Image (cartoon, grey):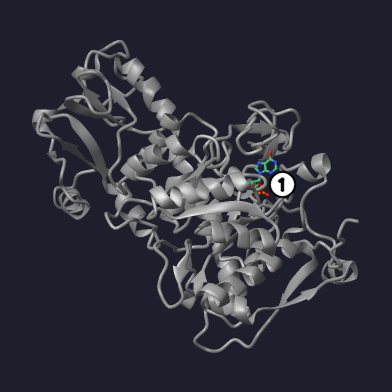
Amino acid sequence: MAQIIAEVSRTFNEFLLLPNRTRTDCSPATVDLRTPLSRHRVGERAAIELHAPFTSAIMQAVSSPELAIALARNGGLSFLHHNQPIEDQAAAVRQVKHFKAGFVTSDTNVRPEDTLGHLLGVMRRTGHSTAAVTHDGTATGRLLGLVTSRDFHPQRHDLAGSVAGRMTPVADLPHAPADTTLSEANARLWDERLDCLPLLDARGHLQHLVFRSDYSDNKRFPHQLVDPAKRLCVGAGINTHDYRERVPALLEAGVDALCFDSSDGYSDWQAEALAWVKENHPDVPTGGGNVVDGEAFAFLAEAGADFVKVGVGGGSICITRDQKGIGRGQASAVLDVAAARDAFLERTGEYVPICSDGGLVHDYHVALALAMGADFVMMGRYFARFDQAPGAKVPTREGFVKEYWGEGSNRARNWQRYGQGGQEMVFEEGVDGYVPYAGDLNEGLAVTTAKLRTTMVSCGSTTLPVFRSTARLTLVSDQSFEESHANVILRDTPATLA
Ligand code: IMP
């Protein structure tokens, strides 16, 4: 007869944190959100430590290079999705690794013979007012001049006239060599009162533009997650089918961490694939998952996983529980796996971080997941709402929404994640829909982070290990939720997004 687990499967919504004593040295500003990404021995540090406990889901609708750049600048890490050809995923990794804060690859480019009307169209499309004029109209062509929206007026100048007639030619343009550092470039921008400094290689081809307006922007990101060469960090999802080809290509492109992406990671295939990666590429942190109990955690940790992702059936776009009857309440799953992680540490002296993946509905769920033992969280719906996510932004009567679709939906058809016995998915395990648009990731994540910091302060902790070892949680009844929303008629407010 089947074994019935006595404990009820619980969700984050069923818990609240109790405040602990807050000492005077404990304030949002003193909270340190660093957390290990990968396996390490007790007393040592992980090869990669996140500067904020956030990762973005391995999904087409979420982890694009743009989102990866924005998240790494805020101290977290994206795992670029693997539901694409190997060379495309490697190119996406390169795009993140080549990003240099303050060094902009020009996206508004024209040729000297193009008309001002054409230039105007390009500027409207990109939203930028400085265009590079290159011999072939590309971002890395030979620079012939710069033209800005201040150089011509659509009503005063003949839009059929050429760009060459209004541009500042390169001979009159301050520029600098390609290896100029950001501080050298900034010094010239201020000393020579420039708005923009083009950086050129030895052949006179454009490499980057440095803008004065980006100067203060760079100061906005003190917690950026960078590698020893100061390039932003990026992770990538992999699968148990083509890892022998995919992993070397991703490493060649400069990826910092990998994660096997499966809706059910408790399998011999994943153990074999992990063993292969650890044998052939022992230095790259490689996670496994997803699992929902201690037994499966121990299986993947023994197989070599550097971190383990927790969560089956809880994702916002997920219909696995309806389709297959498989899953576990995310709170129960995290609590069980965290206990297994601590037991593994006790037994082996090795700490294998765990990630709570999916099902975080409110900002405070992040704090609950971390209090229950997660070292970091992974979110899909949350990040899909921002400008930097790849889904289209669509107007509706109630405001803008962004597209968000599951990897198991017909739109994504990620058969590598949802093994159903072949290269075709027989049934869907995810839905295709929309989420409320939430603007810029930097602003949204700042609010979520501020809430996490103040929750930790209320719980008397300034680090995540102290937070989880001292947190006190209580189960709540439906009635206690009624209590906190008693009898007040709310003024009309915009829909809450988080
Ligand atoms: P969310 O943050 O609640 O939106 O959940 C995101 C997580 O759901 C991902 O990181 C995956 O683990 C999982 N997921 C992604 N696509 C699907 C799907 O189509 N069905 C079920 N789960 C999915």
Give me the residue at 80% from left, 42% from top: 324
In the image shown, does 173 or 296 lie closer to the viewer?
296
In this figure, which residue is indicated by the disc labeled 1? 316
Q: Mark 1: few, some, or many residues within 10 Å (few <14, many ≥20)?
A: some
Element class at badge 1: loop
**Can residue 438 be spotted in the picture?**
no
In the image shown, does 288 or 212 lie closer to the viewer?
288
Q: Quadrant of ligand 1?
A: top right
In the image shown, does 342 or 310 lie closer to the viewer?
342
Q: Give x and y (percent) for residue 298.
A: 62, 63
Image quadrant assignment for residue 435: top right
User: On the picture, is 11 further left or further right than 366?
Assistant: right
Q: Amino acid at mark 1?
A: Ser
User: On the picture, is 422 further left or further right than 34?
Assistant: right
User: On the picture, is 301 further left or further right than 71?
Assistant: right
Q: Is residue 67 above or below residue 114?
A: below
Quarter holding the N terminus? bottom right
